[in-house]
Image (tube, rainbow, N blue to C red):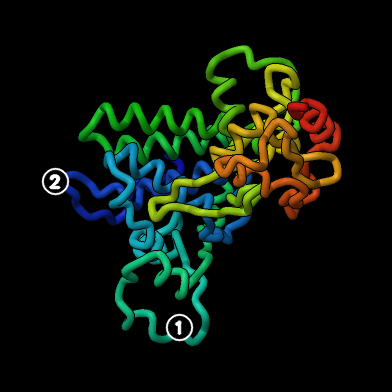
């Protein structure tokens, strides 16, 4: 085993129900997935929504529950682990302010994610380890060693984690090259699932997990999102999973758009079908959306395609 990866099998983990605690291994698996998705590209790892959500997904597979994930613990205690060169604390180095660095040993472990983020919002992953994990082959090897080393007690859990990594790596390949998301239908169910996952991830991140119509943004304490990724031109017709063919919507508004009761137009405003009766009280939640501005991604690459918006408006019920 390459030593840069060997450090992952020497994590200092506690015990949970008589087995190795899954916190640190799940965090490292999440980091590996985010590297393969092109979201982490430098040793500086930002503790953002994507990473924490990914950690919760893996923790749920490993422990059967999202509610006990407590991401602040591995984010904090990973700093005590040795990196590839054997230097203590070099695997993960939180970016602490000079003022906080002098007293951090007296603070004790944080008791919530908010408390941890007040101490640091990013940390540095050992650059040698990052370089190795940039290779898909090495990333798969690292994932296999983490799963074998810390989840040997459950073949079923190992299988679930391996399946998760397979899908994450396939989805990550699309995320790094989103131009691949337009074209003929995927040739296998696995490809279809990976494309769908990449579409969802790119769209929700582009809109910062906020509904493009209602502006609602809600992430549960165990990191589930209120919004869904909705195609502008249906995939069956467009064969297009690029984020420019999608918007983030709450489930009720996703349903309304798919049923052509509302549509975002090329004017970047929402339009409501005249078939929706404004005099019916239960219709007001839709009618109030008429002529409201469409929430747009900050990144111009992911803003809705004008032809896709025109398609939606043309198919509004008249």
- Cα separation, mark 2 vs mark 1, equals 35 Å
Rendering coords of residue 100 (x, y %): 45, 83
* Residue drawn at the location 57% of the way across and 29% of the way down: 170
| Along the line of sight, the residue nearer the viewer: 83 or 217 | 217
* Residue drawn at the location 31% of the way across and 83% of the way down: 106
Q: Considering the image in quadrants, where does the C terminus appear?
A: top right
Count residues near mark 1 (Cα–Cα under 10 Å), then give few for <14, some for 14-19, many for 20+. Answer: few
Q: From this viewpoint, which residue is outermost toward the top?
A: 187
Q: Pointers 2 and 1 in contact (CB under 8 A)? A: no
Q: From this viewpoint, which residue is outermost toward the front?
A: 279
Number of labels in the image equals 2
Q: Considering the image in quadrants, where does the N terminus appear?
A: top left
Rendered view: 26 above or below 185: below
Residue at which label 1 appears: 100
| Along the line of sight, the residue nearer the viewer: 287 or 251 | 287
Rendered view: 104 above or below 300: below
Rendering coords of residue 95 (x, y %): 52, 71
**Any mark on residue 289, and which?**
none
Rendering coords of residue 273 (x, y %): 73, 34
Rendered view: 101 above or below 230: below
Q: Is residue 178 visible?
A: no
Determine the image quadrant of residue 275: top right
Among numbered discs 2 and 1, the one appearing first in the sequence? 2
Rendering coords of residue 77 (x, y %): 34, 63
Element marked by disc 1: helix
| Along the line of sight, the residue nearer the viewer: 249 or 183 | 249
* Residue drawn at the location 33% of the way across and 61% of the way down: 73
Q: Is residue 35 visible?
A: yes
Residue at which label 2 appears: 18
């Amino acid at each position: 085993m390459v030593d840069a990866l060997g450090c992952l099998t020497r994590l200092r983990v506690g015990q949970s129900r008589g087995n190795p605690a899954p916190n640190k291994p799940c965090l490292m698996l999440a980091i590996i997935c985010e590297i393969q998705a092109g979201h982490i590209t430098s040793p500086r790892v930002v503790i953002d929504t994507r990473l924490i959500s990914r950690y919760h997904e893996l923790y749920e597979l490993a422990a059967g529950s999202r509610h006990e994930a407590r991401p602040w613990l591995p984010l904090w205690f990973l700093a005590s682990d040795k990196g590839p060169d054997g230097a203590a604390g070099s695997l993960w180095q939180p970016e602490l302010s000079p003022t906080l660095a002098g007293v951090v040993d007296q603070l004790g472990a944080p008791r919530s994610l908010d408390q941890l983020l007040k101490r640091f919002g990013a940390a540095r992953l050992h650059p040698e380890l990052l370089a190795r994990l940039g290779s898909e082959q090495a990333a798969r090897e690292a994932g296999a060693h983490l799963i074998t080393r810390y989840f040997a007690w459950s073949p079923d859990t190992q299988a679930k984690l391996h399946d998760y990594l397979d899908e994450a790596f396939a989805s990550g390949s699309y995320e790094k090259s989103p131009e691949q998301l337009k074209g003929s239908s995927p040739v296998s169910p696995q490809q279809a699932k990976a494309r769908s996952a990449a579409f969802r991830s790119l769209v929700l991140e582009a809109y910062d997990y906020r509904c493009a119509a209602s502006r609602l943004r809600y992430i549960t304490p165990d990191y589930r999102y209120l919004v869904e990724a909705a195609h502008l031109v249906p995939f069956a017709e467009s064969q297009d999973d690029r984020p420019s063919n999608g918007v983030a919507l709450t489930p009720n508004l996703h349903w309304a758009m798919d049923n052509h009761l509302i549509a975002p137009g090329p004017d970047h405003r929402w339009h409501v079908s005249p078939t929706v009766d404004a005099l019916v009280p239960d219709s007001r939640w839709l009618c109030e959306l008429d002529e409201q501005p469409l929430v747009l991604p900050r990144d111009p690459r992911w803003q809705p395609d004008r032809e896709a918006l025109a398609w939606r408006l043309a198919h509004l019920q008249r």
